[in-house]
Image: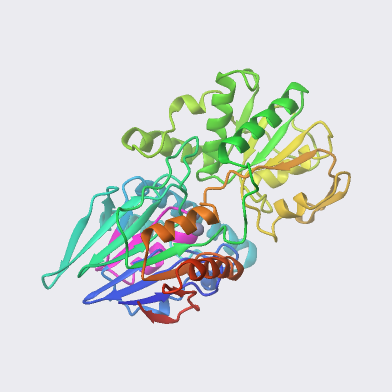
Amino acid sequence: MIYTDLNTEIDVGSSGHLLEFGPFRALVDCGLHPKRMGVHSLPNFSKIQPETLDFIAVTHAHLDHCGALPVIAREQNHAHILISEEGFELTLRMLRNSKNVMSKQREEFGIKEYPLFDYSAIDALRPRIIPMAYGRSRCFEIDSVPVNITFSPAGHIPGAASVLFEYKKRRVLFSGDISFHSTSVLKGAVPPDGKVDVLVVETTRGSYSRPEGSSYDGEVERLVASISRVIRDGATVLIPAFALGRMQEILFIIKTAKDRGAIPKDTPVYAGGLGLDIAEHFIRGSKRSSTFFFGKQHMEGVIPLREEIIPGKEFENNGIYVLGSGMMVEKTPSYLAASAVMENRSNAIFFVGYADPDTPASRMLNTPTGGQFRFRDLFHVGNLNCRIDKFDLTSHADRDEILSFILEKDPRCVVLTHGSEESREWFMDQILDISPKTEVIIPQPSESFEI
Ligand SMILES: [Zn+2]
Ligand SMILES: [Zn+2]
């Protein structure tokens, strides 16, 4: 078997793994790099000749895993596209949003190749997708040679999957983005039973150690108590939240906290944009899924935000504002809203997701109370007087959990992907310490390995 990492850098970047075995060629994930533009955001597809893939397996609907699907699918017309049943519609919805964003960026930055695909390319995917039921192995054959492929729940976000290939008694497992703890909305991962020969695993949190005593449930309680304090003071809380997964989770947490009286029942909750649309998908998908739970009742009382946000001008109504994007990227509602919320010392901005060092969210977290914060493209400077806090509700497994997972699967070979170099090296040291005979690979971009 030959493995090639198509990500163009050693980072979280644009996921893409090529696996070649016997007569088969499979691509696992085909993401767009969130920090790059145009063709530079694609994985290295030059490693794949046109019309040579048999499978394109998509682990989940985050764009760094599925964003380039229409691009690769149109060059690989015979490839089966495999997506979990729960992830099917979410993936198509995210691709449509991505097309819209690219069309806007074409105007704004003059990127001629944008959009990389149009709606028709997304629509053309639908009849080609084979929805994979979790835990149910499917056999595919070429010239009477069989391979079994199984999707299993990976936690992380609804529809996320780990993907197992079984070929001639060899088992190769791709973890995808994975999380073992259950959240308010979603059950934790249930990986396939038994040992595997090769494990291709994510390492997002390899350079972060969760402080002693901290837990998901503890962080949820701390968030609820913090929101409650601000609301009881008659002020406003802004929660920047990623539209897919995190926004619905936060709305779920707020609703259940209201139901038990931990947050005043009459607190207005505002939300907006793509996240509301994804919530509708969750409500529909949840009825058929045993891995996540999100009902109409969790959106009860959520008010779509219609008020125009004017930089520096406070909202007309106090309450809780759950707005995209999670990293407060320029021009998004949460970025604009921050300028409206931050000057009043009674207000608060609570971050609930990862903040990349280059983003406004990270800049704000590093600004001292009372310090100036510059909204460069709004030509607005404000004083950061409100309370700022961050809560660790990560949707990735902690490094110790991933390490236990690796040891339990007892692979002959581990391929460390989807993390910084530092994160991957932490895992490599740990694995070799405990199990020196294991082959541990940190793949260089586009380099192929016999596994
Ligand atoms: Zn993800
Ligand atoms: Zn990812």
Q: Is residue 326 left or right of residue 410?
A: right
* Residue at the image point whose x is 43% and y is 56% from the top: 405
Q: Nearer the viewer, residue 268 or 401?
A: 401
To which quarter of the image does residue 386 belong?
Answer: top right
Q: Nearer the viewer, residue 5 or 396?
A: 396
Q: Is residue 198 left or right of residue 245?
A: left
* Residue at the image point whose x is 32% and y is 77% from the top: 50
Quarter of the image where the N terminus is located: bottom left
Residue 311, given in percent of the width and then of the height, sits at: 78, 43
- As for residue 169 lying within the magenta part, the answer is no
Q: Is residue 229 left or right of residue 153?
A: right
Residue stretch in magenta:
55-81
Q: Is residue 123 visible?
A: yes
Q: Is residue 67 visible?
A: no
- As for residue 69 lying within the magenta part, the answer is yes
Residue 451, given in percent of the width and then of the height, sits at: 35, 77
Residue 102, given in percent of the width and then of the height, sits at: 54, 60
